[in-house]
Structures are given as structure tokens and as C-alpha cells.
Image (spheres, rainbow, N blue to C red):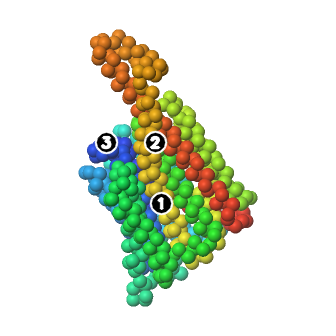
Amino acid sequence: MLATFMEVLDTSIANVALRHIAGSLSASVEEATWVLTSYLVANAIILPMGAWFSMLIGRKRFYMICVGLFTVSSVLCGMAPSLGWLIFFRVLQGLGGGALQPISQAILVESFPRAKQGMAMAVYGMGVVVAPVIGPTLGGWITDNFSWGWIFFINLPVGILSLMMTSALITDPPYLVRKSFASGLKVDYMGFALLALGLGSLEIVLDEGQRNDWFGSPFIVAFAISTVICLVGVVVWELRQKQPVIDFHVLKDRNFALATLSMLVLGFVLYGSTTLLPLFLQTLLGYTAMLSGMVLSPGGIVICICMPIVGLLLRKYQARWLVIFGVIVSVLGLMRMSHFTLDVDYTTAVWGRVVQSLGLAFLFVPMSTLAFSSIPRERTNYATGLFNLARNIGGSSGIATITTLLARRAQFHQSVLVSHMTPYDAPYREALARTTQVVQAAGSSAPDAAAQAQGMLYGTLLKQSSMMSFADAFWIMGVLFLLIIPLMFLMRKTAPVQGPVMVE
């Protein structure tokens, strides 16, 4: 639970510090989003390899290597002298953190008898839900009072404690079969290379597309072609391998395939909206990093309170009905955010996030229950990796898409609004005259006052167009979320859960 807590905490902390990271490293906010997406892509690349590495070097040893790599790279992230180095160290951090959640779950499930698994998963779930509660506020406080580097340095004591406790208390179960190259274990170099190149190319297309005019740029076209060839190629290749990196055969299970697709959409909306809200609060409303973190944290508290309730409801109702309820509530929260204005107050912003988070509490556990309801135990490692891979791909795509949406919609609204800034528009003439009088009364000459007033009105127009682009992005996130509902009706019916519930 400690390592998972550290990994989840780091993701939520970085969101509120994004603007500060961009400023201190002489980068734009759009460029700084690589700090988030590079981690998710590296995370996604290593996720499917967890089962393979566990067989090769032992699960405990592999887990400790991941914790060690994550901890060391966290320290290097805090010391990064430039954006390029920070992204490189975040990639290393993602490679270390990718296997922490699925391996932690596997250790817990297989280390406890069935009668105690429920309590074990409850303790694990505390780490998953408490980290987002304190992450934004802690990250904001550290960023405002020290520097953004300390949001990474705090992982050092947690990582050391996790390594010490894992070394002393965790053992591999006797039925975990170790394999070696001498006994026939093979490295699927081609599958791993296709996966890494495909996901890396996809990220470059998503993150650089806006700045390079998308498919008007040969650079983006080349990487788009690489993305399609590699991702299609990895599916074709892996289906023919006896020891694949990703076992796509688990997608033959209809419930698992539909739940994985739902998790892709969930990751897209979750990471996209979590990045969107702090940016809105800090860039347009002037919130500090800590204050924007305090807007996000009550939503985490709601999730923490509701998850045990969801576990009880799973014993009485089908999981898909809980998912549908959660989607509807989350959409209501996002639609509430789409009506934010530049005059929105702190309480309204908090309640928008709380409503969205209330819906999210009804998604994670029921969706995991649907996904693994009929997956054989011996294939759980592969299925868990693929399930988390979908979430991470959705998350990185969501963050990149959000930055593009904001830029494009701001341009659109600016072009519409500026058409009214003409001498033929009566409201504009009146606003310009009033503003000119105010500036002139403050001591400016008549010509200077007229120029300053026009500049002030144009500045207001830019803020309004940005505000409208954020509203559009929240609305689009809400509409996309509704895509999960028809997927739930395509699933086979599952009986209410009778045993302990797994938390993803």
C-alpha cells in the first residue's frame, strides 16, 4: 500500500504544480504537460511486462526494483535543471511506477486467505483513495512555500520505508513458478519494441500536433503513420506468440473487453478533467497552487467515504447499474463545471468537483468487478496489465487532447468575439467610452486613455475567450463520459458479488 500511495500521490501532486514547473523551466503550460503524459506513456509501456518479469526474477525482487527505480528517479526529477531532463527522469519514474499497482494487488490477493482478502483490499484501497485527497493540497502547499522540486523529494522517505518493509515481510508464494532462459523463457523483443515505439509515437502526435498544425506537418504525419503501423503490428504479432508481452486473447471475454474499453474512456475523462480544473483556477482566477489543491481535495474525501458503501452495494446490485449511476452523476458534475464563469466562487468550484468525484466513486470497483468476473486466475496478471494499460493510454490521450481543445476553442471564441469590437457595435462603443473616461480620470491624456481603454477591453476579450474554451472542454468531457453507458448494456449479466471486492 505504501508504494501505491507514493505513486498515486505523485500523479495528483504534479497537476497543481504544472504552472510553476512551466515558469521555472522557461516552458509553456502546453509543453509542461509532457511532465504528465511522458510518465503515463512510460507507465503504459511497462505495465504488460509485470507478469513476465515476475516469472524471470521473482515477483518480490521485481517489485523492489520498481520501488527503488521510482524512488531514485523521483529525486532526480526534483533536481532536473531543464524541461528535457525532467521529462527524461519522469520516463524513468513511469517505468518504475508502472508495475506497482498491479503487482501490489497480486501480492495482496495471493498472500491472504480468502476470508481476509476483503480487509487486505480495504487497506490497499485506503492508499489509493487517500493519496488523491491529500495530494493536491500538499502539492500546492509545498509549491507555494518551498519549490516544485520538493513534490518529488518527499517520495524518498516513503520509498525507503516501503523497501525496508517489503524486504522484511513479503515472500513469493511457493506456487509462483520461476522461469529462466535456460528453461525456455523467451524475450519477446519484437512485441516490446512495437509497443514502445507505437505508444511513444502516439504521444508525440498528441502532444506536438497542436504546435505543428497537425496533419499539415510532415513531422506529425510520419509519427501518425508510425503509430498506426506499430499498434496494429503489435496486436497481430502478439496474437501469434506463445509467450507474448500482452496477451490479447483475454479480450475474447466480452465483459473484460467492454470493461477495458470503458476504462479507456474513464482514463481519458478522469486525467483530462483533473488537469483542466487546476489550470482554470490558476490561469484565469489567479488561485495559488495550494488553494486550487483545496478545491480538488474535498472530491477525494467524498471518494474515500463512498468506496466502502459501493462495496456493500455490490452485494445487492449488479455492478453495471452502479457504473451507470456513477457515470450519470459524474456527467452532472462536469456539466456544472461547463457553466463556470470568471466570477465563479470557491464554494461553487468545490461543489462541481465533489459531484464529479461522487460519481467516480461508483466506477472503479464495479468496473474492475465486471472486468475480472470470468477471467481465469492463471491469466489475471496479463488481464490486470492490459486493464491498467487502457487507463493510462486514455489518461495520456485525455491530457494531450485537453491542451489542444483549449487552444483551438480559445481561437474560435476569440475570432467570434473580436468581430464585435468595431465602431459599428453600439455596446462596444459605450464600453470603450466608459473605460476611456475612467482611465482619463486617473491622469492619462485623451489619446493615451483611448489606447489604454482599447487594450483593456481586448484583454477582457482574451480572458472571456479562454473561459469559454474551458467551459467547452468540460462539456465535451461530460458528453464523452456518456459513451460508457451503452457499453454496460452490451455486457453479460453478472450476479451481485458474494466475496471480497477487488479495487483497481
Q: Which of marks 2 and 3 is nearer the N terminus?
A: 3
User: In the rendered image of this protein, does residue 415 appear above or below residue 195?
Assistant: above
User: Residue at left 58%, top 48%?
Assistant: 479
**20 and 429: which one is in front?**
429
**255 and 302: which one is in front?**
255
CA–CA distance between discs 3 and 1?
Answer: 26 Å
Q: Could you tell me if residue 162 is visible in this image?
A: no
User: Closer to us: mark 1 or mark 2?
Assistant: 2
Residue type, label 3: Gly
Q: How crowded is mark 3: few (under 14 residues within 10 Å), some or many (20 or more)?
A: few
Residue type, label 2: Arg
User: Residue at left 33%, top 17%?
Assistant: 450
Q: How crowded is mark 2: few (under 14 residues within 10 Å), some or many (20 or more)?
A: many
Position of residue 374 measured from the top left corner of the image (x, y, whole percent): 65, 72
CA–CA distance between discs 1 and 2?
Answer: 25 Å
Q: Residue 272 carries which label?
A: none
Position of residue 168 measured from the top left corner of the image (x, y, whole percent): 44, 69
Say which element carries label 3: helix
User: In the rendered image of this protein, does residue 296 appear above or below residue 58?
Assistant: above
User: Closer to us: mark 2 or mark 3?
Assistant: 2
Q: In this view, does 494 lie to the left or right of 22?
A: right
Say which element carries label 1: helix
Find the residue positioned furthest to the left.
Answer: 81
Position of residue 37 measured from the top left corner of the image (x, y, whole percent): 40, 55
Position of residue 171 measured from the top left corner of the image (x, y, whole percent): 48, 74
Number of marks drawn = 3
**453 and 309: which one is in front?**
453
Q: What residue is shown with label 3?
A: 23
Q: What residue is shown with label 2?
A: 409
